Image (cartoon, grey):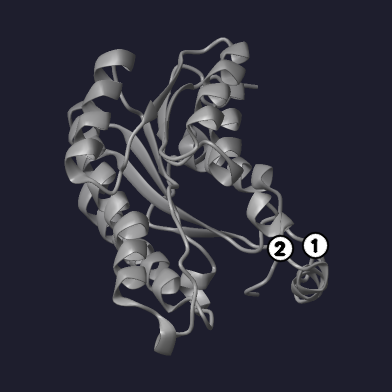
Amino acid sequence: MKLLGGKVALVTGASKGIGRAIAESFAKHGASVAFTYLSSVEKGEALEKELAQYGTKIKGYKSDASDYISAEELANITQAEFGKIDIVVNNAGITRDGLLMRMTEENWDEVQRVNMKSVFNLTKSATKIMMKQKYGSVINITSVVGLKGNAGQANYAASKAGIIGFTKSVALELGSRNIRCNAVAPGFIETEMTAVLDQKVVESWRAGIPLKRGGQPQEVADACVFLASDMSSYITGQVLQVDGGLLT
């Protein structure tokens, strides 16, 4: 059963990890997918070719969502090439970890710009289109760190907490236009980034999770498919934790 047949999705930061899994799952479920990449050009171009096998329209764009003009251009180009935008997934994000006393202003500002300002930029641009359609689903990728905080990640935690507040506010503002806005909060997800960590550290994290394992990008993608589909048509303003029970 293809839950997203006939829909058009725009996914940021899709060249690897969680973003890649989301873009692939959307295509498998019948959506036409526009996605962005920035530094990982080769991976982005490879993903475009790979997703073509699912038989829907696929297009990758090199674009920086943290730049307002670029985000607006991206939304307009996607509408022009695909005809509409039904779903937006704001996934692009970075970390610049460090204890507060050692954190530079640049590291603080960069994380807020990439993680939070990009969500504002693309959501504003895309929902202008959705308002005319009187339909849309916005999914913002936050983190359990935005709910509980984490030592050494004050900048990242602040950006992800900000996304949650933004999500709830947009849900309240645009619900009357049939535009839903939800957030997905992954916990410890095993990606390319976690693969380089010390195995003892990884095992200690797994031990603290009720399901006793890290999550997979596909499990986050599955949650996004649900929130993007009409199966979640009466759900908005919510934060769906995909964390194996970590915050239970």
* Secondary-structure class at tag 1: loop
Q: Is residue 167 visible?
A: no
Residue 114 found in image quarter: bottom left
Which residue reaches farthest bottom? 101
Q: Give yes or no for contact between labels 1 and 2 (Cβ–Cβ under 8 Å).
A: yes
Which residue reaches farthest top? 55
* Secondary-structure class at tag 2: loop
Amino acid type, label 2: Gly
Residue 2 found in image quarter: top right
- Residue indicated by mark 1: 213
Q: Is residue 151 above or below residue 66?
A: below
Q: Which mark is residue 244?
A: 2
Which is more toward the observer, 62 or 33? 62
For the point 79% across and 76% down, which residue is it?
204
Quadrant where the C terminus sits is bottom right
Q: Nearest to the eye among marks 1 and 2: give it.
A: 1
Q: Is residue 69 above or below residue 214?
A: above
For the point 62% across and 74% down, which residue is it?
247
Residue 233 found in image quarter: top left
Amino acid type, label 1: Arg
Q: How many residues crowd around disc 1 within 10 Å: few (fewer than 14), some, or many (20 or more)?
A: some
| Image position, residue 127 (x, y; %) | 23, 38
Horizontal placement of 92 versus 16: left or right? left
For the point 48% across and 76% down, which residue is it?
153
